[in-house]
Image: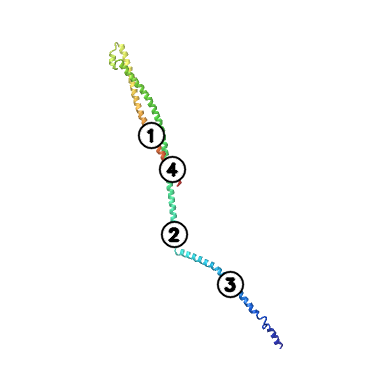
Amino acid sequence: MQEISHKSRIKSPQSNPTTAPLLPHSDGFAEAEKGGKRFIKLSAAYCLLPTVFLLFAIHCSLFTDIASAAKDPKEEFKKLQKEIDTHKEKLEKAKRMEHSVLEELDRTNKDLSRTQAELRKYRDKRRITGGEIRKVEADISVNRAKLERQAEWLKRKLRVMQKHGYSGDAVILLSTSEDIAQLMRRWRYIKELAGYDHKMLNEYKETIKNLTEQESRFKTLHAELKKSEEKIRANEKTIAEKKKGKEMLLSS
């Protein structure tokens, strides 16, 4: 009897109406807590979806590019080789152009030096020719004065011969001598006069010859001087053009 009463007291807490309703309330709270966690996880998953799609798209694009490159490597190689060849051709063309410009510049410098040397030569020739012309002019002036004196002497000689009434025939002059002494005097006079006349005539002819040669030389020198001046002008023009061409080459 006491045992039954004791067992009934032990089981009595299970049949207590005040404690039985607490069990369902605890299970509902746990379920709500679990549902909240699932909602948070789902919200985070939904937030990550755009990032996942973006990464997937990038991955697909990279995979497509890699697949395309791996699919046709020969075309890529040809394309690269073509670009390399194009750059090499441009480089070679630039080198050829540079070499051509340098060669042209070298030729221009040589031509310029040669033309300047010719210019100096013609200027020296002009200076020498000018000096010779001045000397010939002085000689011509002297010979013309000498020729005028000789011509004046010949005129006086002719007037004297006409005044005394004889033509200068030595035979007639000697035959009219009154004695031997007069004959000898006339002979010496005629001899000296003939020698002087001969000398003067020779000098007169020599003066005329020299004057003719000097006048011819004067004309030749003037022609050379004119030619030298034309060469100088042409060379100066050529030098100016070559200098301009050189400046253009250097600026290119």
Residue shown at 43% from the left, 49% from the top: 97
Q: Which label's residue is closer to the chain start, 1 or 3?
A: 3
Q: Secondary structure at mark 2?
A: helix
Q: Secondary structure at mark 4?
A: helix
Query: What's under tag 2, amino acid-wise?
Result: Lys
Does residue 51 lie above or below 172 as drawn?
A: below
- The residue that disc 3 covers is 39
Residue shown at 43% from the left, 55% from the top: 86
- The residue that disc 1 covers is 226
Tell which tag, 2 or 1, sits nearer the viewer.
1
Q: Which label's residue is closer to the chain start, 3 or 4?
A: 3
Q: Is residue 183 left or right of residue 123?
A: left
Task: Estimate the spatial distance between the alpha carbons at disc 2 and disc 1, rounded to whole Å.
Answer: 69 Å
- The residue that disc 2 covers is 79
Residue 82 x/y as whole percent: 43, 57
Query: What's under tag 4, amino acid-wise?
Result: Lys
Residue shown at 44% from the left, 53% from the top: 90
Query: What's under tag 1, amino acid-wise?
Result: Lys
Looking at this view, name the residue that lies furthest to the right: 2
Q: Which label's residue is closer to the chain start, 1 or 4?
A: 1
Q: Are marks 4 and 2 in contact (CB under 8 Å)?
A: no
Residue shown at 44% from the left, 59% from the top: 79
The circle drawn on residue 89 is none
Looking at this view, name the residue that lies furthest to the bottom: 1
Tell which tag, 2 or 3, sits nearer the viewer.
3
The circle drawn on residue 244 is 4
Query: What's under tag 3, amino acid-wise?
Result: Phe
Give the total of numbered labels: 4
Task: Estimate the spatial distance between the alpha carbons at disc 1 and disc 4, rounded to whole Å.
Answer: 27 Å
Instruction: Identify which residue, 18 or 38, lies in the foreground.
Output: 18
Task: Estimate the spatial distance between the alpha carbons at disc 4 and disc 2, rounded to whole Å.
Answer: 45 Å
